[in-house]
Amino acid sequence: MRSPHIIVKHFFAVILLFFIACSQAEETDATFVVEELHTALLNVMQKAESLDFQGRYDTLAPVIQSRFDIPLIAKVVLSRYWNELDQQKQNSFIELFRRLSIATYASRFDDYTGESFKTISVEQLKKGRQLIKTELISPDSEPVRLDYLMHSIEGKWYIISVIADGVNDLSLKRAEYATIINERGFENLIVEIEKKIKELGDTSTKG
Amino acid sequence: MLLTRVIKLIKIFLILMFFSLVSGCATTQTVESPDPLEPVNRVSYNFTDTLDVYLLKPVAETYVEYTPELVRTGVTNFFDNLSYLNVVLNSFLQGKIDQGLSDATRFIFNSTIGLAGLVDVGTPIGLPKHDEDLGQTLAVWGAGEGSYIYVPVQGPNSSRDLPDLVSSTLLNPLFYVTGTVLFPLTALNAINKRANLLEATNIRDEAAVDPYTFTREAYLQRRQYLIYDGNPPVEGYEEIFEGEGNTGNEDTGVLQIK
């Protein structure tokens, strides 16, 4: 029979190994990035009673900012129009899109009814990209498939696209923005997005 | 009498199917934009949206407010089951024999033990609900998407998906119901359907800066997802990143900057 002392020692050794593994995974594993976002989302959902919209926004901001490749997403979402903007306008669009992304998450994940996230599979794609397939499981409705397209820069993984039940938010926005730019011009697109961010904060049920 | 009516309708349906196949194949090769009928579609969309804002949505919201969830689930199950023969047929038409047999068994179980479909007894015993229709079958058979069509009141559609309106109507036992019960049943079906879409339309209202384009893109992508049973080719997700780091002047077929 092993002494309790040795068991405790082994226990701490395992814990230590676990943390080491986690810290390495952080930089090299795309799944970790997605699961970190999911943990942050569950966190604000569970605290929805005490956190208002701004509270959820502030909590989610660092995770979304560091885990999404927002400059690339902002560029792709504007498609050909991107190159017609000068550096300053490009930068302010990136900043606007960052606020829109955070506000969208803060507005949508505003209550908790026993939801959980499950990672289903990881697929290797060309150019070193990965597709992480996950599910948002909810006790009283059908699961929602959330797929994340990931790419890696200098060994760090970033989310570049989210696909919910087959609907790709990025191509959806790209088509919408193209319509508005074509019909009413870029400046009006900025006005519309600013309006949307304000609405997300105003209409959000809690806050 | 009924038989001749059915035969006549089946003939119409087959003709429609043929034309849809032909037009689907023809249009995909020549039309670059997914929405060549946009001006007409926008009129249909605006009409439907006005009707929705002032009538359909408020009625559906009232229905949700005053009807217990259990009852709404029963109503949804009942109408889903009535429309399930269309799923059974299309599972077989797509060559999914095992799924077709499972769907047929599900329909029989839910229609009998499941109290005319009110209770979904199939799912717990391993006969899950599938989502198949004639539009998906035509896609599996190789027909192109064709043009996006916004059908007034009914909603987003495409020329490839239109024939399903006929097949799903003909295969729905409700179509053969006559008499006084028909109107309340049809109305309940419509209200319940709209109620089940409330979450989706709320997301649209919350997220969309151009609701018309949002609806079109979401519909077309969702169809693609269903055609491939939840696993569409990943190239579709990746292609918008192609050319990144280069000039970024790739032709998307959608964006046309003046």
Image: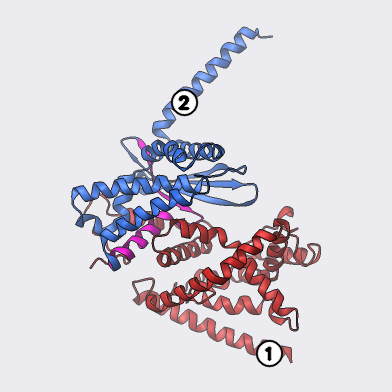
Chain colours: A blue, B red
Residue named by callout 2: A21
> Which is closer to the viewer, label 1 or label 2?
1
What chain does badge 1 belong to?
B
Q: Nearer the viewer, residue B137 or B192?
A: B192
A108 relative to A12, above or below: below
Residue A197: x, y in percent? 39, 51
A46 relative to A144, above or below: above
Q: Is residue A94 left or right of residue B206?
A: left
At mark 2, the secondary structure is: helix
Give the residue at the far left of this rendering: A86
In magenta stretch: residue B57: no
Image quarter of residue B29: bottom left
**Residue at the location (34% across, 77% down)?**
B30
The amino acid on which the numbered mark 2 sits, given as a three-letter code, is Ala
Judge the density around disc 1: few (<14), some (14-19), many (≥20) Cα neighbours within 10 Å.
few
Residue segment shown in magenta: A156-182
Q: Nearer the viewer, residue B203 or B111?
A: B203
Q: Is there any visible trace of residue B248 in the rendered image?
A: no
Residue A31: x, y in percent? 46, 38
B146 relative to A108, above or below: below
**Residue at the location (33% across, 65% down)?**
A179
The quadrant in which the N terminus of chain A is found is top right
Residue named by callout 1: B5
What is the CA distance from the residue labelled 1 to the residue labelled 2?
70 Å
**Residue at the location (45% across, 73% down)?**
B46
The amino acid on which the numbered mark 1 sits, given as a three-letter code, is Arg
Image quarter of residue B149: bottom left
What chain does badge 2 belong to?
A
In magenta stretch: residue A157: yes
